[in-house]
Image: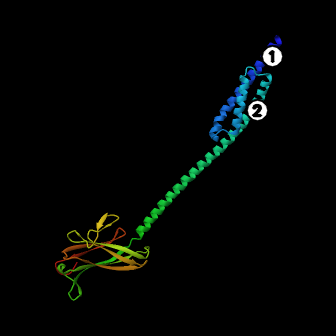
Amino acid sequence: MQVAQTQSENYMSQRDSLKLAYDDAEMRLDSITGANNNLQGEKSTLQKQIESNKAEIRRILNDKNATVADLKRARTMIADLNNQIASLEAEVSRLTGENQELTANNTQLTAEKQVLEQNLQTSSLEKEALSQTVDVGSTFSASNIQITPVNEKKSGKEKTTSSYKRVDKLVVSFDVENRIAKSGPADMYIVVTAPDGKVISEAGSATLTTRDEGDKTYTAKVGVEYEQGTRKPMSFPIRQTDFQRGDYKIEIYHNGFKIGEGVRTLKKGGLFG
């Protein structure tokens, strides 16, 4: 009777010891399984083997009729389970290291991307600024502006007149030049404002868009075939039925900028001012 009781106590002691060992192994496993799943995205083959071993160990420990041989087998399986958990810990450590390296690389790539985007933005701004500089720099300048009131005789001869009543046309002449503008066609806009403040418009109500003054009605658009680096003389007649006494203001525009202006005063008689 005493021997049977001793054997039963030994059996229970072994069973409790195995259960404690198993619980400890399961706690270790729980602490790393979640991390491994996060890092790997799905259960590994090792984790599946561990779960299979856990199920068998639990079955033996929960079996009230388990034999001493069963308990011995469970002990061996718990030892194997601890070895598998150690392998899983090593795998998690490796994946964690790789994840940290990927994070560091990603951080570096993000920083490099930001630098590249800033450089591209800077380059775009510099390119835009350069383009604007070239655009402004290619605007022509007008010089030697002359406004000549002319009387046309029936014979075809022309004569500078001394009376606004005899003026048939105002001949606007000037030179245009630009050292960086490429050879090719260009348009000059002439705006003639009569003494009454109204713009003489041979083109109807056509307008040009200026850089500083908004839309402006112009009198005529004059084309020029420009040759780079040269000074090109231009001349254009301004006509109307009746010229008025007073100041005629002539403005010349190119590329949206006013590039020159002049005033011719028509008087009642005598020499022109």
Q: With 144 as the anchor, is 166 left or right in this view?
A: left
Q: How many marks?
A: 2
Amino acid under disc 2: Asp
Q: Residue at x 80, y 22 (%)?
A: 68
Q: Quadrant of the C terminus?
A: bottom left
- What residue sits right under mark 2 in the picture? 80
Is 49 drawn above or below residue 250 in the view shown? above
Q: Residue 116 at what x, y percent from top left?
A: 54, 56
Residue 156: mark: none
* Farthest top residue in view: 1
Task: Find numbered disc 1 in the image and state the secondary structure of the residue it sits on.
Answer: helix
Between 86 and 111, the one lying in front of the other is 86
Q: Residue at x 37, y 77 (%)?
A: 224
Amino acid under disc 1: Gln
Residue 222 position by quadrant: bottom left
Q: Quadrant of the N terminus?
A: top right
Is 264 drawn above or below residue 135 in the view shown? below
Between 129 and 83, the one lying in front of the other is 83
- What residue sits right under mark 1 in the picture? 7
Q: CA distance from mark 2 to mark 1?
A: 27 Å
Mark 2: give few (<14), some (14-19) or many (20+) Cα within 10 Å.
some
Q: Residue at x 64, y 38 (%)?
A: 37
